[in-house]
Every structure is written in structure tokens, then in C-alpha cells.
Image (cartoon, grey):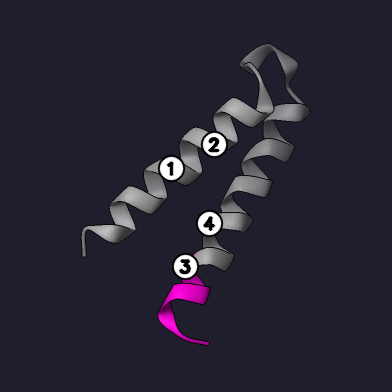
Amino acid sequence: MDQISVRMVLLLLVGGLTAFAVLHHPGLGAAIAVATAVVALLHELMARE
């Protein structure tokens, strides 16, 4: 796999795991919003290399 596809897999895994965790604790907020924020932050941090 090249670097771009590895990044995509990592982003999807982290987003999915974040959404799963937040869904099991509804008091933490909306799962989609939290997962999107985490994936966006990781994407920005990884792009700065």
C-alpha cells in the first residue's frame, strides 16, 4: 500500500472507533460530530509532515 491509502485506512479506523465509543455513551454527544472532528484533526496533523 502506498502512503495515501494507509492514511485513509487509519482515518477510517479512528473515525469508526470514535463513533462506536460515543454511541455507547450517549451523554457525550452526537457520534457523527465527534467522529468527524477526530478524523479532521488527524487529517490536518498528518498533512503537516
Disc 4 residue type (three-letter): Leu
Label 1 vs 4, first from the N-terminus: 4
**Camera-side residue of 24 and 48:** 48
Residue 36's label in the rendered image is 2
Per the model, the C-alpha gap separating discs 1 and 4 is 9 Å
Work out whether 19 lies above or below 31.
below
Label 4 vs 2, first from the N-terminus: 4
Disc 1 residue type (three-letter): Ala
Residue 45 in the magenta stretch? The answer is no
Disc 2 residue type (three-letter): Thr
Circle 1 crowding by C-alpha within 10 Å: few under 14, some 14–19, many from 20: some
Residue drawn at the location 53% of the way across and 87% of the way down: 1
Residue 4 in the magenta stretch? The answer is yes
Q: Secondary structure at mark 3?
A: helix
Residue under circle 3?
Answer: 7
Residue 26's label in the rendered image is none
Q: Position of residue 3 (x, y in %)?
A: 42, 79
